[in-house]
Image: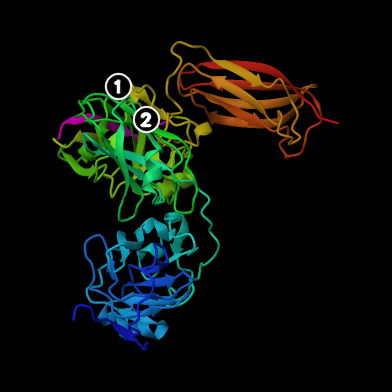
Amino acid sequence: ADLAGNVAGVMSIPFLFRLPQRYDVVIDEIMADPTPGVGLPAYEWIELRNISPSPVNLRNWRIADASDTSASMGDFLLEPDSFLIVCSASAGQYLSVFGKTLTVAGFPALNNDKDRILLLDPNGEVIHGVAYNDSWYQSVAKKDGGWSLEMIDHFAPCVAEKNWKASDDPRGGTPGKINSIDGNNTDSDPPRLLYASLFSDTTIILVFDEPLSQDNEQLLSRFMLQPSPQIAAVSLVPPLFDSVKLVTRNQLVAGEVYSLTVSGVTDCAGNAGISQTVKIGVPQPPVPLDIVINEILFNPPPGGSDYVELYNRSDKLIDLKELFIANRNSAGEVASLSQLSPVTRLFAPGEFLAFTTDPVSVARYFTVLDPAAVIKVNKLPSLPDDKGNVVLVDGLGTLLDEVAYSQKWHFPLLTNREGVSLERSDVNGSSQQSNFHSAATTAGYGTPGYKNSQERLIPNSTTRITIVPPVFSPDNDGIDDFAEIRYEFPSPGYVANITLFSANGRPVRFLQKNALSGISGYYRWDGLDDQQQPLSQGIYVIVVDVFNAEGKTEHFKKTIVLARRQ
């Protein structure tokens, strides 16, 4: 009885065919949150698509999510390039009007925000798996319910978020037929290592951003651990195959930091990854100020999300699973704890990591040099726009760092503080107001996951303004097409005004007006005037006036030659 399935309007065909390979049948569409309905019945379902050249009999196949597995499916012959709606028995009669429908007992209840769906063959092998979350909708409105998630390119089933989007169909989905967003989305991106963790003192887990190919013999040659011990075995980790398990011949020594290099691993589309090196070792418990709160965005741009960046200034590998970001309630007690990782994940010495509920939003408004350094958490404590506090504690409640911030900490000449982060100026300094400053204009007002724009690097230095190159030719030939006005300041908080004059003293370009600069950086001139018209060749004068909130002012005058190639 547990093998029975009900096919609405379709004759079951009890024939056996060749065993399908991984990705022969893919999960092509997911309705995880059907309410409030848009135009489809308020039931959960998934859609399967046969992308192989042969028919596939789904007898004894199962559907699983992160917590439940369905009963076995009955006989159903899924023809090449055809679709099948799979749902619960109660939903079958309502969904069968849209296409061929197969009901299965114990169809898993899909979570609205995130879940993992697996398509299993009779032997329990994973044919396709999808671990979705609500950022995949790429729409704030649609992720609230009534819209399905559709795969863009069914021939790129390994690609995760980049190959999924909310349906564009006015009904909210396309059950039983080709997806509304169907198109070419060829996977040309190599696999990228996201993070490392330690399962035991002889077992290392590496997590990638997409599934890898399955040749375990080839995998062994792709990893190098220094110094010893040697790697004894390498294998892919089911069910999504986006993780690799390494087993070492000997135990890792507590307190020692190892370098693990991975190079040339391939995804299921055959793209080979670049060489990457991560720090590995047995994690150690932190003590106060081993990890510091390095940057806070508490007043994000419209539609944006808060983030908190941490910096590991110790020489230890620290487990993010044991760290919590919190705030203080009205009674002054530590409250609203948010765990930084549900699984063991190593935080390496000298590493910057930013935490947010919406990494996509952060990447939309700020430069993200390494997406793996901006980590999604389920929640962050409340960070009010006017003032608040950020508290970092370990699993035992030990206070590691605390910043009681205020919007008054921002640079006083900023006209709009929205979307501007506060950065720690000295990673080894205090967590007080004197050691924080608004992120620089040149950095886009935030540096999530990498070194702060206002980090002090040159103690007791003087201001330096240099022009590189002294002669430039903006003709788009790739050689000296831009002039850079490079700067170095002795402390944060300098504002720059840059004006360009012709040789006869006429102003031709107001390049920067009241630009909040970082400790070091550059502004670029492209040889155009204020009307974006090309200037004629000749000698130009660059005047740079800088000042800070303490009243210090400096004036610089530099010359540059604009050349036009004949």
Q: Position of residue 362 (x, y in %)?
A: 42, 45
Question: Residue 409 has which mark?
Answer: 2
Which image quadrant is residue 407 in?
top left
Q: Please name the residue shown 16% across and 31% down the image.
A: 398
Q: Give percent across and percent down for residue 175.
A: 42, 76
Q: Is residue 127 above or below residue 200?
A: below
Q: Quadrant of residue 91?
A: bottom left
The kind of residue tagged 2 is: Trp
Above or below, 50 against 223 in this view is below
**Residue 388 at least partly seen:** no
Front residue of 225/350: it is 225
The residue segment tinted magenta is 397-410
Q: Residue at x 47, y 44 (%)?
A: 365
Disc 1 residue crowd, few under 14, some 14–19, many 20+, Cα 10 Å? some
Q: Is residue 459 magenta?
A: no
Mark 1 lies on residue: 430
